[in-house]
Image: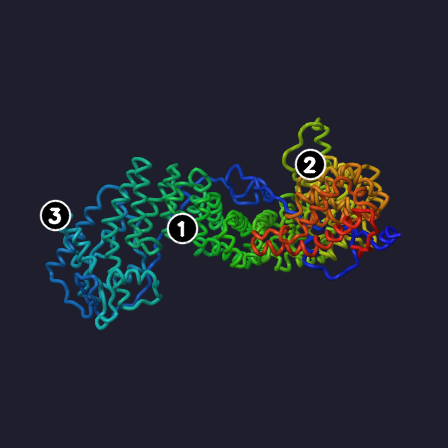
Amino acid sequence: MQASKNKNTEKAEPFYRLSVPKQKTSSEIINEARNVLRTLRTRRPFTPAEDQRKLFGCGSSRAPQNRPPSVFSLHASSFDLAESRPVSGVRLNPLDHKPILVTFAKDEDSSISFPKPPADAAEVRKVSSARACLFRRTSHGSFLSAKMAPPHQNEEKLDSEETAMMSNLCRSNDNCLAEQRSYTPFNDESRQLICNEHISSLERGDFLKGTAGNFLFRLRGESDQMKKPGTSSSWRRSTGWKTRLTGLEIETRMNESEEEEIFWHIKILPILHELEKGDNIENLCLACTKLYQALNEGNMLGKRFKRRRVLLKTLYKLVDIDSDPLCLKLAKIILAMKVDGKNLLSVCKLAYKICRNEKNDYIIQNDRLLDCLLEVLRTEDLQKTNEALLYCMGAIKFMSGNAVLLNEMVNKGAVEMFLQLMKQINNIKEHDTHFSNLGHLLVQLTATLRNLADLPPARRQLVCSGAVSELFVALEQRMNDRDVCTYIVRILSKLSSYSDFCAALADCSRCYILFLALLNKHQKQQDLVIRIIFILGNLTAENNQAREQFFKEKGSVNTLVSLFQTYHKLDLNAQKWYHERGGEGKNHPKHPSEAEDVLIKLIRVLANLSVHPSVGAALAAAHRVVELLVTVLEYKSVDDCEELVINAATTINNLSYYKVKSSAVQDKKIHIAQMLLKLLMSDNMDGVVEAVRVFGNLSQYHEICDFIIQKKIYKFMIALLDAKNQDVCFSACGVLLNLTVDKNRRAFLMEEGGIGKLVDCLRDFGPADWQLACLVCKTLWNYSENITSAASCFGEDTDTLLELLTSLLDEEQALDYSLNRDLRDCHKLYWEREFKPVAEKLLDRIQSHRSFLPTVTVTPF
């Protein structure tokens, strides 16, 4: 009687079966995450490195005739000397006053408050003699000196406006110290100074350090505005020249010209003679290094240098020498001279040509060419110089392939500069004539950002600088440019692997629309498709809102299904081709094929979407989706492509969780079980575990339980309890638990020693995994529903089970208090809410049936 009463009151609750909706505890929520629905991870798409550095890669969608050349010849004739003239002076009116020549005190730190009287005649003659001597001594011999000749013998001339200005100045100032340059247009013999050709080099050095460095023209009455020579020079250059110059500025400019002239003859001209000799590459490179340093020291870099044309002509001729180290130094100087027009394009091509050779990376690191190229990007007009900027950016792209130079870019603020350039490009609309050409530049820019995305500091800058919005603007505008789209998607693919950027990406509401549009437009472009799918997989891996947003976009599921069909067909054709060539029986490729890789990442998106309750339920009812997943299990074995098959099984497991009307999984459950049996019998343990998980959900249905018994799959489940792996044991216990719901099937546990193995699992994993311990107790509870004798029910494992339950129910013994507080609290939560209630009832049942005395009724679990 009592046994019958117990039978009616004690009803087993299958662990995997869905119960009536109720408020879930935190442990139940964690249970679901662990045992029922799972998101998937996968490798980032592989991008092979280019064999050679090119402006556009081998896979570029641009036809050769529609893009700038990657390879070209470059000679001295590529440069235009006419564009190398210095900026002309400003036409000035004659002065109404006479400036006074002032000598500064020797103490550079002392300020001058009052003008000094002019130098005496002897001193003037001494200075003038030294200058004239310098000019005469450099007027013989080489073509460089010939350029200093008078205008009727020489190309080098003053601009007409500059000539007029100088004439007016000299006529209006009788007290002005002036000189006749070797190329001056003046013919006034009375104003020429006599040269003492026997002046010593020591006197010349003293002159440069002292007198010439301490002369400055200034106006009467403005002594309070005087600056030191060094300070005034840098101040003048930093503030620029105004359209109309004041008297002080005119006199300052005259003084500057004198200092520049002296510096040219003493410092620059000897180096140019060295370059003219050009006996070997090493000496030429050394001379270029000295030249750059001298020009920088003399403040002669830029466009205002009057001898600029002669200097550049010398440098252009050296381009014909086939030497990358020399050309690197030439490019650096020419860029620093702020050339424009054709010369800017040619020097950017020169830099591009140098950077194209990977072997030059080391010398590029040491010569700081990057600074010059970044300056070009920062200062040049985008529309006027877009071709020059293209090769400039191409050179920088090549540099970004080197780890040292890549880090240097980040340190120099290149990330923000690139984003500003992208913003300028994005402001050019499609109807603009420059739109197409700027697409070529955008390819170089996005390719460089793709390389920068690997560096943590660059990633942080991209997140903080709002790169997401600019990238999507470019993506939207350049939808038809597959190269630009591919590089932008590569950037997003890299960055989406990081949670901070993934969150910023998920917040961009239009990203899903754009991704779907790209997938539909470029469906057969595997390199583009796979990265978009990878990004969507990352977005839906942890963000429930992203899952819902993407699913609600019009046509999202249809697009995924269409892609699935396209790449499934490609994979079938590839597999057929492989077998036709005798591939059957041979080892399969180690890595997934391109089509398989797309399918892997596509299924991952479906698995991640299915974690959302409403989305998962909708997908479970989507017959086309489930059919495609089952198809993967039909034509692929785990040996063919492990990740693809396991991902398909995981997604089916997620969808099988939802018991919805018209469930496609429920309709195909027998066929799915047959496909899983193939996976279950494989040697791949990950595949086995995934198949067991699916059986855990499907075993809620009586037809599947019958299938498991009929095919003797239960023996396999019992055998898995010996796996000594918590996850494997947990999944196997889930299936056994559902099988024990039917009283007619419970005897199977005794056949294969199932009771002993369940007890072993409880002993081995109980204290470390209370969820698994709870599952074992629930299985034994179902099994012992009709118990009459503990010994007959549990056999020789009865005493062991009693001792084990007693020990595990002792809080002091069961819980490890050496763990940190958070982990201990988590263990205690599972122990109290899940394990303890079931274990207490099971212990009470065993104890009450240990003797043949009548037992009391217990409340069913």
> How far across and down, in percent of the image, does residue 713 sit?
79, 38
> How far across and down, in percent of the image, does residue 117 sit?
14, 67
**Which amino acid type corresponds to the residue marked 3 in the rendered image?**
His
Q: Secondary structure at mark 2?
A: loop
Q: Give me the residue at 30% from left, 42% from top.
A: 287
Viewer-proximal residue among 793 and 490? 793
Q: Provide the residue designation for mark 1.
A: 371
- Which residue appears farthest toward the right when viewing the image? 1
Query: Which quadrant holds residue 259?
Result: bottom left
Query: Which quadrant holds residue 121?
Result: bottom left
Query: Which of label 1 and label 2 is nearer to you?
Result: 2
Q: What mark, if any, has residue 684 been given in the picture? A: 2
In contact (CB < 8 Å): disc 1 and disc 3: no
**Which amino acid type corresponds to the residue marked 1 in the rendered image?**
Asp
Q: Secondary structure at mark 3?
A: loop
The numbered mark, 1 or 2, whose residue comes first in the sequence reads: 1
In contact (CB < 8 Å): disc 3 and disc 2: no
The numbered mark, 1 or 3, whose residue comes first in the sequence reads: 3
Q: Provide the residue designation for mark 3.
A: 198
Residue 625 visible in the picture: no
Q: Secondary structure at mark 1?
A: helix
Q: What mark, if any, has residue 380 been given in the picture? A: none
> How far across and down, in percent of the image, does residue 685 sit?
68, 38
Mark 1 to mark 3: distance in Å? 45 Å
